[in-house]
Image (tube, grey):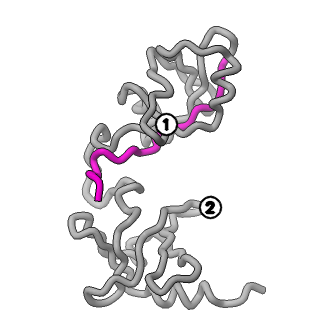
Amino acid sequence: MSDPSSKLIVVGALKGAHGVRGEVRVKSFTADPADLFEYGALTDEAGRIVLTPVSARPGNDHFIVKPREQKQKEEWDALKGTLLHVPRAQLPAADADEFYIEDLVGLEVHSVGNVAEGRVKSVQNFGADDLLEIQLITGGASVFVPFTLADVPDIDLNAGRIRIPDLMQWAEEGDEPQA
């Protein structure tokens, strides 16, 4: 398994060019949106530098950024939608009972005992609250479990596991035919 601190974490997205002077629009996904510009160079999913912010000012639902990289308007527009990443090691430590979503992906899922019954495939949010997408060891479709203290009472990042006491109940509910 690779070093978790070298994992790239999504912190924002490029929204295309802003005007014709080389500025770009950037959407921040950080808790404090302006923190995005404290991390230095922002990369794509492969770790290639996309944009190094020189300055940033707020826009409507984004920031207008002057990048170090010199590109034409059309080049920035072609990068629209590119997710911006930083290495996990650059992010501040999470507070107690807080987690970075990427730290949860890949954790084993247990309901009772020490036998893994699944693995966290992803964390999704379809507009309400966060859901853990669990891929069961037995295969088949993923199971979605609300990411709440009641449904996911134990998370042990050091052991690489979480406990979902009612995991099989969620799996059975997912098998019910839709009306």
| Type of amino acid under label 1 | Asp
Looking at the rendering, in which quadrant would you find the N terminus? bottom left
Q: What residue did someone put label 2 on?
A: 126
Looking at the rendering, in which quadrant would you find the C terminus? bottom right
Choose mark 1 or mark 2, whichever is in front: 1
Q: Residue lying furthest top in this view?
A: 21
Dot label at residue 44: 1
Magenta residues span 1-18
In percent of width and height, residue 136 lies at: 47, 81
Q: Residue at x 51, y 67 (%)?
A: 131
Distance from Cα at disc 1 to Cα at disc 2:
24 Å
Answer with left or right where residue 95 lies relative to residue 136: left
Answer with left or right where residue 98 lies relative to residue 159: right
| Type of amino acid under label 2 | Phe
Dot label at residue 164: none
Vertically, is 121 above or below 39?
below
Q: Residues within 10 Å of mark 2 (few under 14, many from 20)?
A: few
Q: Residue lying furthest right in this view?
A: 179
Vertically, is 145 above or below 106?
below
Q: Residue at x 37, y 53 (%)?
A: 100
